[in-house]
Amino acid sequence: MERKNCDVVVVGAGFAGAVAARELSNNGLNVVVLEARDRVGGRVWSSQGWGQTFELGGQLVHWSQPHIWAELTRYGFGIYDLHDDSHDFATSLYLNGNHLEDMPPEEMDRRISKGFKRIVPVAENVFERPYEPFFRESDLQRVDHLTMTEGLTQLGMQNDERDIMDAVLSGAFSAPAENGAYSQCLRRLATGRGYSTGDIIRFRVRGGFQAVVEAILEDARADVLLETAVARIEQIDEGVRVHTVSDTIWTAKSAVVTVPVNALPGIDFIPPLSESKRAMMDERQATQGIMFFVHLLGEYEPLMALASSEHPLTWMETRAKIDGGMIAQVLGPDAERLDMTDLGQVQAAVRQWLPNAIVAGTLGHDWVHDPFSRETWAIARPGQLVKYHRDLANPEGGVYLAGTDYANGWYGYVDGAIESGLSVAHKIKRDLGGAQTLSARHTNAALGQPT
């Protein structure tokens, strides 16, 4: 058993952990980052395949997301458009039950836009201030108990209109529409106010999203230890003791735990976290889906395809042409329905849209069965926002939860992870007495004392 000391232990080297480590270490605190995986990035993972870079996890970026946009500006990263003129969709396919429609992309856009236009006014009312989700709490309480399916029905959507929105949302939210909360659909539309969903999902970071995490950590004065999983966190009089699975004990004043909600049960907290936090951990948030890339042999025009949520894949978009084939990105609402490594299963699922498709390979990661994530991107179940969200952000002794699962604004996105990491870092600096007021800094400077 090895014992070590520092001021703050950060559990996890994703965006939230990297930002918290930078803010705290550059404020003079001794920070150690413990990362269970053999790489940094958390649920962001830029991987090579077919001679190109693909994002296996978090990937969406847009200028309406203030926190990630600030980081891109700070470190000089650019973006690119997936849907530039060379990759405009030539056709769109929609499978509803056993009925397959082939339609112009403009018709697919019209149908989807029609559905979202009915939802947006509700979103802008319930989440008038998107970064203050409880600003209109009485309005929120009237919708938070509804599933996404129930919310669409409440808006008067019927038959084809509701079905195509069910297909869109089941893919976009990585969960069957009947499992996710309607409030989460509203919340995401409110944060992207003024931009369509198509606008929000079309841009990627040049050089890979993981490189941004690496840049943040390079800017920090923190030690990062890879392949160092945490088994137990104890609260003690001096702060916390963090036990790794390799039997090293770190004693620190505070611990920033950037573990997703569904993976929190993998750490033994002593004493246990609050009743509210444990209830959320027991219920789990809703995402249970898959997202990966497939190599299709043969020539294909750029296309987008949707399917109703009873199918194993509900979303497909072609991404890049390669010699002898096409790379497409696919999403499904339930990881238990499809093994992305089984080419036969994947080919059968793709053939729901393209009957003659031949799948030559896949590239992806099963986040739902990964013990360090147990989920894809965060989507609350009905009632969880009102019941649990505020307490999740409350520290317990020296233990602070951070990550996109705990964000107020772009919940489930990288922007939310950064927001949460910044917020928690400020709380720790305040709680440890490290945040001086502007007047105090000026006074110290005038006296020739350190600021």
Image (cartoon, rainbow, N blue to C red):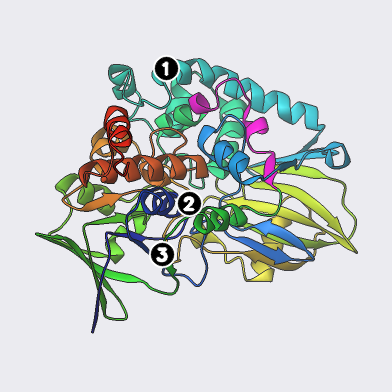
- In the picture of the structure, the residue carrying the numbered disc 2 is 15
In this rendering, position of residue 45 left or right of residue 229: right
Q: Position of residue 333 (x, y in %)?
A: 53, 50
Residues 193 and 215: in front is 215
Residue 160, horizontal then vertical, whole percent: 62, 28
Image location (x, y in percent) of residue 101:
76, 37
- Looking at marks 2 and 1 on the same chain, the residue that comes earlier in the sequence is marked by 2
Disc 3 to disc 2, how far (Cα)? 15 Å
Determine whether the residue tagged by mark 2 lies in a helix, strand or loop. Answer: helix
Q: Which residue is mark 3?
A: 372
Instruction: Name the residue located 57 percent from the left edge and 44 percent from the top edge.
Output: 171
Label 1–label 3 contact, CB within 8 A = no
In space, the residues marked 1 and 3 are separated at their CA atoms by: 34 Å
Q: Which residues are magenta?
A: 189-205
- Please tell me whether residue 203 belongs to the stretch shown in magenta: yes
- The type of residue carrying mark 2 is Phe
Do we see residue 137 in this rendering? yes
Marks 2/1: CA distance?
Answer: 27 Å
Q: Amino acid at mark 3?
A: Phe
Location of mark 1 (residue): 128
